[in-house]
Image (tube, grey):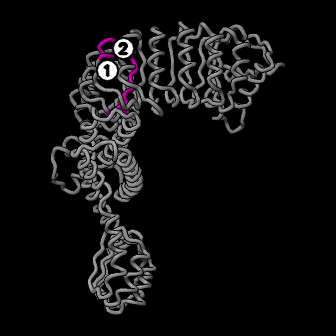
Amino acid sequence: MLSEIKENGISTSNDASRLSAEVTHLEFVGDRTSTSGKDITLLEEFLASACKEQKTSYSSSLRSLKITHYSKLSDKKILYILRSYPNITNLNFEQSGGFTDASLIVIARLCPNLESLNICGNQGITGHPIYKIAQSCQKLRHLDIGFCGNITDDFVYKIVKANCKLELLCIGGLKRHKPISDRTIIAIASSCPNLHHLSLMGCHNITDNSVNKLLQHIHNLEYLELDQCRLITDLSIRSVANSCPNLEHLDIGACDASETSICNIVRSCKKLKYLNIRCCRLVTDKVISEIVQHCSNLEYLSIVGTTVSKDALRKLSPKIKIKQDSALEKTPEEELNDLRTSLVYLAQNLWLTYANLEDIVQYCEDKIKDEHYQKSIVELERDMRGTAESLGLMVRIVANSCPNLEHLDIGACDASETSICNIVRSCKKLKYLNIRCCRLVTDKVISEIVQHCSNLEYLSIVGTTVSKDALRKLSPKIKIKQDSALEKTPEEELNDLRTSLVYLAQNLWLTYANLEDIVQYCEDKIKDEHYQKSIVELERDMRGTAESLGLMVRMYGLKEKINYQPTRPEYDTSHY
């Protein structure tokens, strides 16, 4: 715990509460305790004292109370704290839980002089009591409700309209229901002229239109977070250089910012101490050169996912903490492991996105008769699904209908192990069998081949999980084509993964472009709220997956490593 209680070695228990009347601030970190458990003990003693309504020598002097990361901060405890310390003007309950909207209603009633409130990360709180606080506590200057998932855009709009004196506002991560909109950002621009600290991290729906208006009206910003604002383009980033000369903290991670705009920011914002330009794909060594010349106060720099070189970084002041994750510093084995892990999660996300697309297609099947839409959505679905179902059906038919089959190629089909085993049992004349990339094939299929396919001369099992032990049981006359990762060197597997990822990234962006066309085409044709919400989430999920894959390609320089020649240059230059 970092607090005045700890610094002065003071306990809040009844027999040791000889605090100086000058104590104005107490700070506790609840669940993140020291090994001895002393921190949590001090917090619980303080809360027990408040709940017993015991007077202390600092009952009237305490102005600021910080209790963070404490999961048992109940409504009852907060009520007793407010009764015992009536002059509190600053409350910080960041990442603390256990209390509900009821506590905030009490704060609105008992704390008319409240100046600062932080409930960041409380997922149970809604917007209504925050609105009541904004109305009742007209001295409120600092409000952090970031990542409170139940607070909607409508209430944030009402909050900023109700209190025009805000100087600090954190509303990032409010995306469980209706995310922050342009309307709310414009309201902030007109209602909060004194704002100097603004966090909009993860506000995926805001656009250049609102951000530019914000920067035109507010010129005293010292802290600005736009990380993961996906619709923000270089138009907004360009305005930062012209509108925020006093900026000390800037986070534009994963924004589509040009190198020219970032260089202009570096030249104009000479007070910068913190700069996050992670995953800004156009950042090169030129930005670092500008930082060296103009940012003498810089203390932190994140360049994860950029192409900045080691030589450029060596020119920076050693006092700057640099966060980087350059693939240039990784061994091939480390890169290979990273790519394997990322591919697994990307594949999972892509199938989830496809499932959402299926739901939307079914929902709209009877609602939209437009021939252009029907054709487009069918092609989009087919792009994502492939021909897995039809080929799987073909495999099952083959097993029952082709007893004289000698040559069968069902590579990359979605065939079950049972179906393939039935083929092997029924088609005893087989000489050629290709079951490459049939993901469900195991050693059981090989056992069936040993028993029933005495004429087999060729077998391809590339991309399956068949073991070496199973293959040893086969006749030596069979030519076996295999490309198991177990038999590849890490360098060979790494090269294959690099190539696959680059082309997969391009194909995914093409599919996303088709989805964008469909969304725009239907924008004015379908007013159904369920559809609107679903299609926006689908578009966001697919773009997120495509961006993640594109970032991986850029971050590891995969195109350069495989000497890639784009088949669709417009997607290569725009996205990865």
Q: Nearer the viewer, residue 465 or 451?
A: 451
Question: Residue 16's image quarter?
Answer: top right
| CB atoms of marks 2 and 1 within 8 Å | yes
Give percent across and percent down for residue 557.
26, 49
Mark 1 crowd level (few <14, some 14–19, many ≥20, 10 Å Cα): many
Q: Magenta stretch: residue 214 in it?
A: yes
Q: What residue would you read off at disc 2? A: 189
Q: Is residue 263 above or below residue 215?
A: below
Q: Magenta stretch: residue 532 in it?
A: no
Q: Secondary structure at mark 1?
A: helix
Give amino acid for label 1: Ser
Q: Earlier in the sequence, mark 2 or mark 1?
A: 2
Give amino acid for label 2: Ala
Q: What residue would you read off at disc 1? A: 210
How far apart are the alpha carbons under marks 2 and 1? 8 Å
- In the picture, which quadrant includes the C terminus? top left
Q: Which residues are magenta?
A: 213-230
Q: Is residue 509 above or below residue 220?
A: below
Please name the residue shown 57% across and 19% down the image: 129
Give percent across and percent down for residue 174.
46, 29
